[in-house]
Image (cartoon, rainbow, N blue to C red):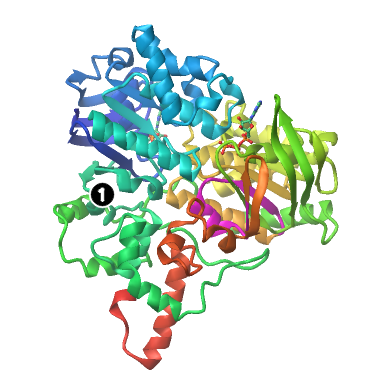
Amino acid sequence: MIRFDQVSVTYDGAARPSLRDADFTLPEGELTLLVGPSGVGKSTLLGAVSGLVPHFTGGTLRGRVTVAGRDTRTHRPRELADVVGTVGQDPRAHFVTDVVEDELAYGMESLGLPPAVMRRRVEETLDLLGLNELRDRPIATLSGGQQQRVAIGSVLTTHPRVLVLDEPTSALDPAAAEEVLAVLQRLVHDLGTTVLMAEHRLERVVQYADRVLLLPSPGTAPVLGTPSDVMAVSPVHPPVVSLGRLAGWTPLPLSIRDARRASAALRARLSEENGPRTPDGPGCPAPPVFEARGHGDGAPGTGSGAERRETGEGRGREQLRAAVPTTPAPVSVPAPRSGLLGRLTRRGRAAATAAEPTGAPAATATALGIRRARTEVLHDVTLTVAPGETIALMGRNGAGKSTLLAALTGTLAPTTGQVTVGGRAPHRTPPPEMVRRVGLVPQEPRDLLYADTVAAECAAADADAGAAPGTCRALVSALLPDVPDDTHPRDLSEGQRLTLALALVLTGRPALLLLDEPTRGLDYAAKARLVETLRALAADGHAIVLATHDVELAAELAHRVVILAGGEVVADGPTAEVVVSSPAFAPQVAKVLAPGHWLTVSQVAAALKATEATDATASPRTPETTP
Ligand SMILES: Nc1ncnc2c1ncn2[C@@H]1O[C@H](COP(=O)(O)OP(=O)(O)OP(=O)(O)O)[C@@H](O)[C@H]1O
Ligand SMILES: Nc1ncnc2c1ncn2[C@@H]1O[C@H](COP(=O)(O)OP(=O)(O)OP(=O)(O)O)[C@@H](O)[C@H]1O
């Protein structure tokens, strides 16, 4: 159904192709997952299928891409619209109309479908994606996840034979993501739809894939194989695969169910330990985080142990291994340089202590209620955020997370109750006085970026924060060393844009840092860098509140998890206590190793090391659990 014939794409002015030597066929009626580190060319490959590359993006496409027999170089995206449905990374870029129902009908109208068919398909899609209650709503008033569902729905109504999706679950809560993936799987199984989907959160999607197409590193040819064969060699993989590689499980499990079946010995071994040593309050140093290094570097969790015990099962695995270079995965958010970050956080501490008397909370909400349009979106929310504390704010799409963050920044005024940040009521305090008290990195970092160059953004951030000229640029250099002054923010990758937005906000050294869904579009390595940066800030006294659907991020970073449902706080407590028993919010490791309170692969690796050290003095090693 989709055929790439020796395809390379080079953007205008680029020194190297962004996609090279792509040569593969994707058959009809299969779901193929496209994976790879940030900036490796996934969106470029997807664009070559929908015709956006090179027709809209410019650049040169060599070779031939055919979709249902049509050459995408000679067929513009409009001439492919009856066959290919595309949802890009930013749902808002997708919308043509203002209201949910109209948006669902728009694609069918363009294809000239009869009104009766349109009506039936709109109703079906509203039901299928749980959008019924939102059908009359202006799209601009929907939450991020609600908008993403509408974008997906608007493509499904045209019944395309090929669906091309760029991170379709990035703004969805875990349950909504499962619902959308189940719908896609039904289309594949029941209607023979061909789905090609890029996604960074592999823990959500890999078990749904028939095949995985891996772009291992920039300029390396794509590798196609079964999910388990590709995951065995991929530089990006979900925690359940890291755990399987660490424990040496063969075949490598991709689902929680398979991992639980393989995990009896590991669970027994870990039960001898006293449980994970998690940071349960501000100021506690935490264990290392997501695996940030590439395959083959011998680090725990990269699978070297598992591979030594490989039995060779899995057709094609050896060829895959040969095709995947063993260089570390490129990262889009480089490690902070300790000197500069140190200076940043020291200044942060000065700001934090200047803004807060010792022991005072960074922020409070008391019996907070907020009405938007005619709906009460938050109700009776009471919350205290301490300096140095990292809180993950979780909950279903539309639960009110972004609304709570907006109340903390002062963008929305309480309808009832009170909010204080650094001792002030944020909605009544002039913005310049709030800059050092609170900063928000919004769900879409583009919303903070107005200027044409990175340098101009930095100059504006210095002026807004009353900081010495050069303050912001020093931060950008620390967090994004390779980005020149004259780069247009539009040309940065998702991860780079997020980091630029973070640097702009940190220029004001806010005592309270708010981040709305900060891992959208980030690969595992970039996420590890973000975690490192946020930990350094928390250790230095900044309070951090993250609204996130990323259960793995919450497990790594948060001291405390607060769950909102229908605008109310329904859980608030230490991370392990809140997430371990929750089917929706537990990270993969917790699900595999329940009832133990293990949350991350790094905790398990540390525990195994400890038991091994004990065993080395007492008895022979247990090969099964040797990393
Ligand atoms: N329109 C464009 N013009 C010039 N360069 C581009 C354009 N689009 C992408 N690039 C560059 O091509 C490379 C591949 O980008 P692409 O967006 O395809 O990667 P990706 O794997 O989808 O990344 P991510 O996971 O961050 O979305 C990057 O170096 C990017 O900067
Ligand atoms: N401007 C607005 N007018 C009316 N209702 C709104 C407006 N903005 C948001 N809402 C509604 O308020 C509710 C809470 O939205 P909010 O953006 O706070 O949710 P969220 O928990 O951040 O969701 P997500 O996880 O999808 O980002 C949703 O039902 C949303 O539709």
Badge 1: few (under 14), some or many (20 or more) residues near its Cα, within 10 Å? many
- At which x and y percent is residue 426? 80, 39
Front in this rendered view, residue 469 or 604: 604
Considering the image in quadrants, where does the C terminus appear? bottom left
Q: What residue type is labelled 1?
A: Pro
- In the picture of the structure, the residue carrying the numbered disc 1 is 227
Residue name at image x 25 percent, y 32 percent = 190
Quadrant of picture, ligand 2: top right
| Residue 17 visible in the displayed image | no
Q: Which of 287 and 280 is in front in this view?
A: 280
Residue 129 visible in the current orientation: yes
How far across and how far down the image is residue 92, in percent?
51, 25
Q: Is residue 175 above or below residue 70?
A: below
Left or right: 582 as drawn, with respect to 592: right
Residue visible at 57% across and 31% down? Answer: 446
* Left-right relation of 165 to 555: left
Specify whether residue 551 is painted magenta.
yes
Element type at mark 1 = helix
Mark 1 sits near ligand 1, with its Cβ under 8 Å away: no
Magenta highlight range: 541-562
Q: In this view, does 536 lie above or below 58?
A: below
Residue 175 location in percent, x, y? 47, 43
Residue 63 position, x and y percent, is: 19, 26
Question: Considering depth in this image, is 315 or 528 the residue closer to the camera?
Answer: 315
The residue nearer to you, when weighing 399 against 77, is 399
